[in-house]
Amino acid sequence: MTDINPPVIAVIGLGFVGLAAALGFTEKGYNVYAFDIDVMKRNGLKQGKIPFYEPDMEEALSAHLNRGFNLCESMEEAISQADLIFICVGTPYQEGGGLDMSSLISAIHGISRLKNRDHFKGIIVKSTIPPGTIRGILKPLLESVGFEVGCDVGLAYNPEFLREGNAWEDFLKPDRIIIGEVDSRTAGLMEQVYRRFESPCVRVSPETAEYLKYASNALLATLISFANEQAMIAESIGDIDITQMFHLLHMDKRWSGFPARMSHYVYPGCGFGGYCLPKDTLGLKHTASMYGHNAKMLEAVMQVNQDIADFTAEQIIRLLNHRDEQIGILGLSFKPGSDDVRNSPAARIIDLLLDEGCTNLTAYDPVAMFPFRNHYDFPIRMMNSLHEITVSSDICVIVTAWPEFQSLAYNTSGIKIVDARFMLESNKTIPKEELQWEEGSTK
Ligand SMILES: NC(=O)c1ccc[n+]([C@@H]2O[C@H](COP(=O)([O-])OP(=O)(O)OC[C@H]3O[C@@H](n4cnc5c(N)ncnc54)[C@H](O)[C@@H]3O)[C@@H](O)[C@H]2O)c1
């Protein structure tokens, strides 16, 4: 807490997120001006009452009210002295029409009408918004009323990941702080503010930050629906203790991160393959149907596995000048560390490229070229080394995440690379030796 001029903070919208943020910033020693449009809510807060149940929050309010946490009667009062304005208004889903952003737009309008233009203010959206909103809607909105973003006003997106029921603790100790940066001045001020939180703070594009918030919730929703679909299938089959089954499922080493981590399965690639995942997913879907249950998620899981192969083949085709160019397939086994080629994504992608009329396909795999030849009858040439395939190809596609392909991160030969395993960028965060434990590695 050694900043000479700590930024003054305004928080607009005092629901779960806004109140946790306003009190949390005060707890960290900042001077906070807070405003909510709802007069009843403001009156309750003035009397020390929070309008929802949230552990530790009422105590925080009573500790900070008028001692760093300043409740304001107008937007103007809240933002007049602020360096950073955090907008935390609701963005509810409207049936058939995406998110209702009218409160957000009206808050931005309010800020832009009242702003003293000599004092730079960074506007930070904490509300959840669809990817593209910050740069596609809010930045033009500010510009349409005469602001130059980055010059007299700043803009950023800062997704909030707190859980209701744990809002206070989650706000004070976030897993990570994400700054969706538009202008560096606002992002720099945010870094200064969040230095007191001792959590990793990462600057990314606003679109990445917006998408991260959506993906984070969509993943949780998917896992819950997966579990619920399993419970419905088990009920149809009968004689299955679903509670016990799930407790035992959680004893898989992957949940505790050794030797493989669950995070390696929640990572994109060009599809799962091998002997077990495709066969057992299809098998369970079939069993469910025999008991009268249509396992929609399992069906979608298989469909997406085909879609991702189509998507990868389209990416390759788009980069070709003509169908006779040489395409090098890097990796034939379904996962690194194995020579198993059964249901390998490489086979699906090669099949699609041949269907598209590609005539010059080559492949290299450190251990799976012979098994691939035996298993499939594709007209492709095998190459002896990574060097040989990369120097002779017009375009190379990483289909299996073999660690040796990581050297292509330093691709100096200028060949086009489709990194369908997202491994060349990921070396910043995933240690090379762990790449062998990636999606589809269960047997
Ligand atoms: N609730 C959560 O657990 C959670 C977690 C992370 C992110 N989010 C996101 O954060 C946002 C806020 O969520 P919440 O649960 O706090 O919402 P909420 O509905 O509880 O609170 C929103 C507050 O904003 C106020 N408001 C609306 N328009 C205003 C305006 N123009 N000026 C001032 N105040 C205004 C409302 O009166 C309300 O008190 C949403 O986009 C939500 O998706 C919520």
Image (spheres, grey):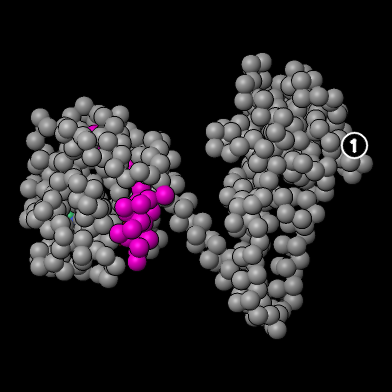
Task: Report which quarter residue 350 is drawn in.
Answer: top right
**Whole-percent x and y of residue 408?**
66, 25
Q: Quadrant of the C terminus?
A: bottom right
Residue at image x 28%, y 61%? 16
Hey, which residue is sitting farthest top in the picture? 413
Q: Quadrant of the N terminus?
A: top left
Of 154 and 3, the residue lying toward us: 3
Residue at image x 38%, y 53%? 161
Whether the residue under disc 1 has CB within 8 Å of ligand 1? no
Q: Which residues are magenta?
A: 154-175
Of 188 and 412, the residue lying toward us: 188
Residue at image x 21%, y 27%? 151
Q: Is residue 83 left or right of residue 425?
A: left
Task: Report which quarter residue 95 is drawn in.
Answer: bottom left
**Whole-percent x and y of residue 87?**
24, 49
Q: Which residue is mark 1?
A: 370
**Whole-percent x and y of residue 220?**
50, 60
The answer to whether any part of residue 34 appears in the image is: yes
Hey, which residue is sitting farthest front in the picture? 2
Q: Is residue 1 above or below residue 328?
A: below
Query: Is residue 160 within the magenta segment?
Result: yes
Query: Is residue 157 within the magenta segment?
Result: yes
Hey, which residue is sitting farthest right in the picture? 374
Amino acid type of the residue tagged 1 in the rendering: Phe
Q: Secondary structure at mark 1?
A: helix
Hey, which residue is sitting farthest bottom in the picture? 239
Dot 1 alpha-carbon crowd within 10 angstroms: few under 14, some 14 to 19, many 20 or more = few
The answer to whether any part of residue 140 appears in the image is: no
**Whole-percent x and y of residue 365?**
80, 33
Q: Is residue 386 left or right of residue 416?
A: right
Q: Is residue 96 left or right of residue 435?
A: left
Q: Is residue 400 above or below residue 150?
A: below
